[in-house]
Image: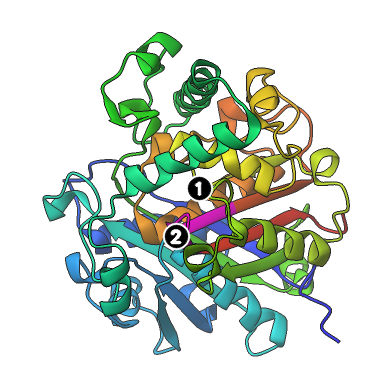
C-alpha cells in the first residue's frame, strides 16, 4: 500500500529571480539568476546534481522544447534533464519530478527549475495556444476573465450573496495582496492600492475589474532537493521537508455533466484531500500556517479557500472580510504578494510559491516574515479553466511536524 513521501525529501536550497519586465535579460539569464541563489543556498556544486526537471509553459516563445535549454544555461554535467509542461502547474510538476526521484532512491540530489519569459512576446496577456481539436470545438470563443467571472455569478446565486458585498470581498483580496507585495523586493508590482481604486477600476468581466486580474511577468524559480539524511550530513539544520505532493486533473465531468454547479474547482477539492491525507493534516483550518494559491483572478482565490477546506462552504466571504487571510491573520494567503503582484510566468509560478514557504519556515522572509513560527505551508496551482483544469497541491513543513 502506498505510504506517500512525507518527510522523505528535504529542500536543500532554493532561489528565485526578480520578477517583472526583465528587458535586461533573456530566459537563460533568468534561469541562472534563480539557480545561482539556490546553489549557494544549498552549499553544493553543480557536479553534485544528478538529475533535473525543467518547467516551461509556452516554450515556443522563448527557450524551445526539451531539457537542452536548462542543461546548456546551467552547464549541467550531462545528467538526465526532463522538460515538463502541465499548464500553470508546470513549476509544481517539475518539483514533483525531482522530489519523487529522490524519494525513490533513483538519485541523491535533484533540481527543479521553472522559467518563463513572456514580456518579449508582444502579448498583453498570455499568448494563445492550441487546445486540441475537440476543446477548440467546445470553447471557440472562451476567454479567461469571462469563464472565471462566471464562478462569481454562480457562487452568489448558490449562497445568496449580495453583489456589492461580493465585490467588496474581492477588492479586499486585491488590496491585501498588493499590501503584501509592497514588502517583497522580488515582486513585480510593489504599489499599495485602496479598496476604492479596485471598486472603481474599469470592468473586464463582471464582477472582475482591472485590479482583480493578475498580470504577465518574466521570472524563474529553482529548488534543489535531497534526503533529510544527506541534508544533515551537509550541515543543514531546521530542515524544511516535503509532506505531500498531489495532482488532480479534470476528466471531463465538470464540462459535460450538470452534477458540477460552477461554484468550485472539483480538482482542488480532490487534490487537497489527498494532500492532507498524505501529510497527516486532519484539520486544515487549524493546522495550516500559510497558503499560496493560484490567484490568477481574485475570485479564484476566494473560491479556492473553500476548496482547500480552510473556509467552510459558503464561509469565505466572512473569512476574507474578517482578515482571516491577511498577513497578520490566522492563515495568511499570498504573504509574498501572490500572482497579483508577481505576475504569472507560467513555468516559474509553482516554484516561486514554494520558495516563499521555504523562506518563511526558515525565518528568512525579511520584512514580511510571519512572527509566529509556520509549521505547515500549502501551495496551490490551477492550470486551465474552472470546467477543465490541472490542479497541484503541495504541502511543505518543518521536519518531523
Q: Gap in Å between the C-alphas at discs 2 and 1?
A: 9 Å
- Circle 1 residue: 294
Image position of 16 with respect to 32: above or below: above
* SS category of the residue bearing label 1: loop
| Quadrant of res 104 | bottom right
The C terminus, quarter of image: bottom right
Residue 362 visible in the current orientation: no
Q: Which of 65 and 73 is in front in this view?
A: 65
> Quarter-wise, where is residue 249 in the image?
bottom right
Residue pointed to by mark 2: 383
**Residue drawn at the location 32% of the way across and 71% of the way down:** 135
Label 2 Cα crowd, 10 Å radius (few <14 / some 14-19 / many 20+):
some
Task: Tell me residue 230's x, y (percent).
Answer: 73, 74
Q: On the rendered image, what quadrant is the N terminus found in? A: bottom right
Q: Give the class, few, some or many, for how many residues have Cα within 10 Å of label 1's Cα (few <14, many ≥20).
A: many
Q: As drawn, is 114 to the left or to the right of 122?
A: right
The quarter holding residue 325 reads top right
Which residue is most to the front?
A: 258
The range drawn in magenta is 380-389
State whether residue 223 appears in this view: yes
> In the rendering, at what x and y percent does residue 138 appear?
32, 67
Where in the figure is residue 389, as x and y percent of width and height? 47, 63
Color scheme of the displayed model: rainbow
Amino acid at each position: 500500500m502506498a505510504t506517500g513521501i512525507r518527510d522523505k525529501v528535504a529542500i536543500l536550497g532554493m532561489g528565485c529571480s526578480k520578477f517583472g519586465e526583465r528587458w535586461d535579460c533573456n530566459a537563460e539569464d533568468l534561469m541562472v539568476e534563480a539557480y545561482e541563489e539556490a546553489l549557494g543556498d544549498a552549499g553544493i556544486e553543480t557536479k553534485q546534481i544528478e538529475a533535473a526537471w525543467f518547467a516551461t509553459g509556452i516554450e515556443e516563445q522563448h527557450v524551445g522544447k526539451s531539457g537542452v535549454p536548462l542543461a546548456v544555461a546551467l552547464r549541467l554535467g550531462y545528467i538526465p534533464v526532463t522538460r515538463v509542461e502541465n499548464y500553470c502547474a508546470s513549476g509544481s510538476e517539475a518539483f514533483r519530478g525531482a522530489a519523487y526521484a529522490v524519494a525513490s532512491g533513483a538519485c541523491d540530489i535533484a533540481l527543479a527549475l521553472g522559467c518563463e519569459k513572456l514580456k518579449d512576446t508582444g502579448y498583453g496577456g498570455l499568448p494563445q495556444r492550441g487546445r486540441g481539436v475537440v476543446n477548440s470545438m467546445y470553447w471557440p470563443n472562451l476567454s479567461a476573465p469571462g469563464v472565471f467571472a462566471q464562478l462569481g455569478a454562480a457562487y452568489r446565486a448558490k449562497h445568496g450573496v449580495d453583489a456589492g458585498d461580493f465585490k467588496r470581498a474581492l477588492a479586499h483580496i486585491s488590496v491585501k495582496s498588493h499590501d503584501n507585495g509592497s514588502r517583497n523586493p522580488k515582486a513585480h508590482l510593489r504599489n499599495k492600492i485602496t479598496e476604492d481604486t479596485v471598486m472603481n477600476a474599469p470592468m473586464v468581466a463582471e464582477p472582475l475589474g482591472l485590479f482583480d486580474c493578475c498580470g504577465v511577468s518574466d521570472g524563474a524559480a529553482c529548488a534543489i532537493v535531497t534526503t533529510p539524511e544527506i541534508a544533515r550530513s551537509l550541515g543543514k539544520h531546521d530542515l524544511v521537508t516535503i509532506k505531500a505532493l498531489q495532482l488532480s486533473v479534470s476528466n471531463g465531468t465538470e464540462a459535460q455533466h450538470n452534477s458540477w454547479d460552477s461554484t468550485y474547482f472539483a480538482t482542488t477539492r480532490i487534490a487537497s484531500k489527498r494532500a492532507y491525507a498524505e501529510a497527516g493534516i486532519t484539520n486544515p483550518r487549524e493546522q495550516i500556517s500559510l497558503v499560496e494559491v493560484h490567484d490568477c483572478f481574485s475570485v479564484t482565490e476566494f473560491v479556492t479557500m473553500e476548496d482547500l477546506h480552510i473556509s467552510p462552504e459558503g464561509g469565505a466571504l466572512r473569512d476574507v472580510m474578517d482578515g482571516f487571510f491577511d498577513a497578520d491573520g490566522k492563515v495568511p494567503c499570498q504573504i509574498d504578494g501572490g500572482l497579483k503582484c508577481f505576475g504569472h510566468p507560467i513555468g516559474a509560478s509553482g516554484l516561486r510559491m514554494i520558495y516563499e514557504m521555504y523562506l518563511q519556515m526558515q525565518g528568512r522572509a525579511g520584512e514580511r516574515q510571519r512572527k509566529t513560527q509556520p509549521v505547515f505551508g500549502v501551495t496551490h496551482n490551477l492550470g486551465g479553466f474552472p470546467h477543465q483544469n490541472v490542479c497541484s497541491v503541495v504541502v511543505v513543513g518543518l521536519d518531523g511536524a
